[in-house]
């Protein structure tokens, strides 16, 4: 990422950055509201009004792509590889990073309900998996014991 380092940049999501700043090839006249991009000849300038940011609208039915899109837009990151970090899937990264989400523009956007819905989906899925495993595990164990018992008795 070519954004400057330090506060507020390191805690800023892509959504907040795109909504709050524009990129220009000429140095803006108001230096207090502009910053030089690192490793570039371009500048970023604070917008007077927030931009409308549009992205692909996914639902929880899209699985890992849904959680990745939320992390991509609303969780601060420097390199795209930081999004998943050491997690195997976007859902695991989302669960671990949900407290890092950038809510600074919450009054201007409706993504907070998307994040809350995603958290609820994860909780429901987790509860469903526990319920399913608790329901199936005794039957599976019983069937395995029955097969082992049947096998043992046939061998005698």
Image (cartoon, helix red, strand yellow):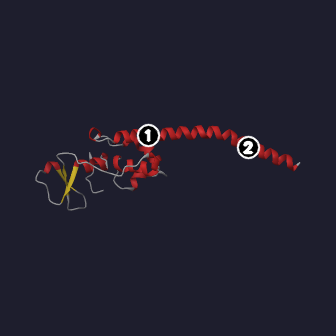
Residue at 22%, 46% in the rendered image: 50
- Judged from the image, the secondary structure of the residue bearing numbered disc 2 is helix
Q: Which of the two residues, 114 or 92, is positioned nearer the viewer here?
A: 114
Residue 115 visible? The answer is: yes
Residue 146 sits in quarter:
top right
View extreme (right): residue:
156
Q: Tell me residue 49's x, y (percent).
A: 19, 45
Q: Position of residue 98 (x, y in %)?
A: 40, 42
Disc nearer the start of the sequence (2/1):
1
Mark 2 Cα shell of 10 Å, populated few (<14), some (14-19), many (≥20): few
Residue 143 coordinates in the image, percent (x, y): 73, 43
The residue sitting at 13% across, 51% down in the picture is: 31
Q: Is residue 141 left or right of residue 68?
A: right
Rendering coords of residue 3 (x, y %): 26, 54
Q: Foreground: 11 or 150?
A: 150
Residue that appears at 31% across and 47% down: 13
Q: Is residue 6 visible?
A: no
SS for dot 1: helix
| Residue under the point 36% across and 39% down | 113
Q: Is residue 63 left or right of residue 37?
A: right
Asked whether the residues under the numbered discs 2 and 1 touch, taking CB atoms below 8 Å apart as contact, a structural biologist would say no
Q: Quadrant of the N terminus?
A: bottom left
Q: Within 10 Å of the Cα at label 1, are there few (<14), some (14-19), or many (20+) other Cα atoms?
A: some
Position of 2 with respect to 33 (left or right) is right
How many labels, in total? 2
Q: Which mark is residue 119?
A: 1
Q: CA distance from mark 2 to mark 1?
A: 36 Å
- The part of the image, by quadrant, that contains residue 128 is top right
Residue wearing tag 2: 143
């Amino acid at each position: 990422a070519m954004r400057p380092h330090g506060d507020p940049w390191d805690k800023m999501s892509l959504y907040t950055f795109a909504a709050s700043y524009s990129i220009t090839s000429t140095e803006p006249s108001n230096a207090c509201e502009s910053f030089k991009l690192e490793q570039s000849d371009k500048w970023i300038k604070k917008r007077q009004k927030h931009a409308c940011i549009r992205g692909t609208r996914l639902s929880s039915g899209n699985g890992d792509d849904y959680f990745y899109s939320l992390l991509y837009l609303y969780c601060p990151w420097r390199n795209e590889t930081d999004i998943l970090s050491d997690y195997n899937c976007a859902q695991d990264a989302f669960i671990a990073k949900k407290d890092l989400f950038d809510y600074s523009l919450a009054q201007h956007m409706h993504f907070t309900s998307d994040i809350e819905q995603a958290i609820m989906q994860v909780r429901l899925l987790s509860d469903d998996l526990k319920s399913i495993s608790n329901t199936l595990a005794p039957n599976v164990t019983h069937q395995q014991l029955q097969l082992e018992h049947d096998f043992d008795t046939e061998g005698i």
